[in-house]
Image: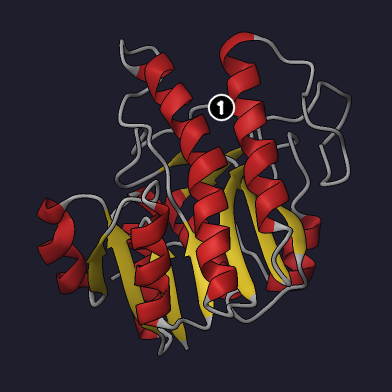
Amino acid sequence: MKIFLAGAGGVIGRRLVPLLIADGHEVVGTTRSTEKVAALRALGAAPVVVDVFDAVALMRAVQVAAPQVVIHQLTDLPSAPGTPGFDAGLERNAKLRIAGTRNLVAAAKAAGVQRLIAQSIAFVYAPGDGARVESDPLDRGATGARKSMVDGVVALEDATLEMPEGIVLRYGLLYGPGTWFEREKRGKPALHVDAAAHVALLAVSKGKPGIYNIAEDDGAISSEKAKREFGFDAAFRITS
């Protein structure tokens, strides 16, 4: 299958490209930076330099690629929590989730794509007892920086679910190679970056449209739906 991977040069994208290639897929991978082109090509993807905020250029890129599936792994969070640039990064990331996702969905629809798989997050649920499930409410009453985060997630998920086969993957807090926390978890719900990439691969051909929690069984959320639909395994690691 031909896959258009938006954000192929990102933390998850770099782990996902080789998995897709090994599974027999052809990957067109986007990046905003010409500096990442050679690295994407080395991973096996056909690189495309495009800014998701440029709706016309993005539309053209998707139409030229003519993919069967679009995967949205775009983020804009270069600064770790507690560092000076983190709050500004949250604002940029919310803008990307709102306007960027809207542009990507429009481009996918125009190209006749049915399935779009999008990265969301599983740590914006409203407070409550027990492990959160997909039908539990998000924290829409949040304020400050968390409100910006929740608003971005709501917009991303709503746009994704407009697709005939829109799949939302609500990832836990990432750790592992290339993340801010390579050797330790940074809270709950936790998720290793390799397991995050692997479930995106599984979602290319498995699972019904809808929202899925994707994280380890640490009591914060339940990923039972993803286990049933995708065969999600939080213990998956890339060994080569």
Q: Nearer the viewer, residue 181 or 76?
A: 76
Count of number-bearing discs: 1
Describe the element under mark 1 as helix, strand or loop: loop
Left/right placement of residue 55 relative to residue 163 reads left
Quadrant assignment, res 194:
bottom left
Give the vertical position of 88 relative to 18 (above or below). above
Quadrant assignment, res 162:
bottom right
Q: Nearer the viewer, residue 87 or 184?
A: 87
Left/right placement of residue 138 relative to residue 100 reads right
Farthest residue toward the front? Answer: 56
Q: Residue at x 68, y 71 (%)?
A: 231
Kind of residue at disc 1: Gly
Q: Quick check: can you spot residue 3?
A: yes
Residue 200 locus on image (x, y percent) = 54, 65
Q: Nearer the viewer, residue 52 or 120?
A: 52
Task: Write down the residue under mark 1.
Answer: 187
Residue 20 locus on image (x, y percent) = 41, 77
Residue 215 locus on image (x, y percent) = 63, 47
Q: Residue at x 50, y 65 (%)?
A: 107
Give the vertical position of 159 relative to 85 (above or below). below
